[in-house]
Amino acid sequence: MAQMSSESRWHHATEPPPALHDRIRARIANERAPTMRTRHRIMLAVVVVPLIVACIVLIASQLVYHRYAVGLDVDSTRVTKLLLTLFLLAAMAMIATAVALWRGRGGFGIGAASLAIAAALVVPLYAALTLIRPLHVSDDAVINVVISPWGLRCAVLAGVVGLSAIAAFTAALRRAVAVASRLRGAAIGAAAGAWAGLAVFAFCPSGEQQHLVAGHIVPMLVLIAIGALLAPRFVRP
């Protein structure tokens, strides 16, 4: 009897207080159910983000240079390298997006190691493709436009594209990431950074190393940090 009484007291002592149950019920009652399934939100984000990139690049190019996608305007001897670089940057953006948004059969997403690798490799790969023997060796095509050595204009464009992508990807995974949310946030930032890097590559005709580092690469690092810091609070269940 004494043993049963002791077990009963232990059971009652370990039960959650009624106030906790009330808070959980209130939280569930106040949480609005999503109007669209996660899979459909992901599909929508995958379509919307490239459209955002294209629209921003075309509009910004026309406003600044009065021409479309000046960054893709190179002399005939560099066309092959341009197409290869453009293809690799687009492929990197799509792969980074797939890693960040992949949910898997169980809904837990891709492994933590893959998320970390994606977040760590996007910027070095972009730097290797754009800094080593850059495509643009002069600004003759846009001689009437002053291009900042610090890439301020490109940094703003990268920020607009990248933050839009982070918002879209985070909304797609809202309340759907049960594990490794911090790494998933970093991967979201890396995917957004890859799209931002592709945007400034198409927009910018500068080949100066300082400009490319400050205006193209640094914003990508900032976007990864923003994704890691802000996205987890929205994607956790």
Image: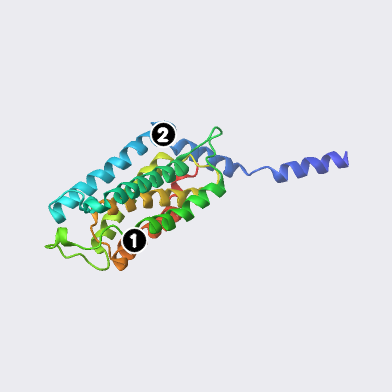
- Judging from the image, what secondary structure is the residue with disc 1 in? loop
Q: Image quadrant of residue 24? A: top right
- Name which residue lies at 34% across and 57% down: 130
> Which kind of residue does numbered mark 2 sit on?
Pro
- Name which residue lies at 17% across and 48% down: 68
> Which quarter shows the N terminus?
top right
Q: Is residue 80 visible?
A: yes
Q: Say whether residue 94 is left or right of residue 160.
A: right
Residue under label 2 = 34
Tell how many labels: 2
**Sequence-first tag of 2 and 1:** 2
- Name which residue lies at 30% across and 48% down: 80
Q: For this rendering, which residue is in front, 83 or 122?
A: 83
Q: CA distance from mark 2 to mark 1?
A: 48 Å
Picture coordinates of residue 161 (x, y %)? 30, 50
Q: Image quadrant of residue 225? A: bottom left
Picture coordinates of residue 122 (x, y %)? 43, 53
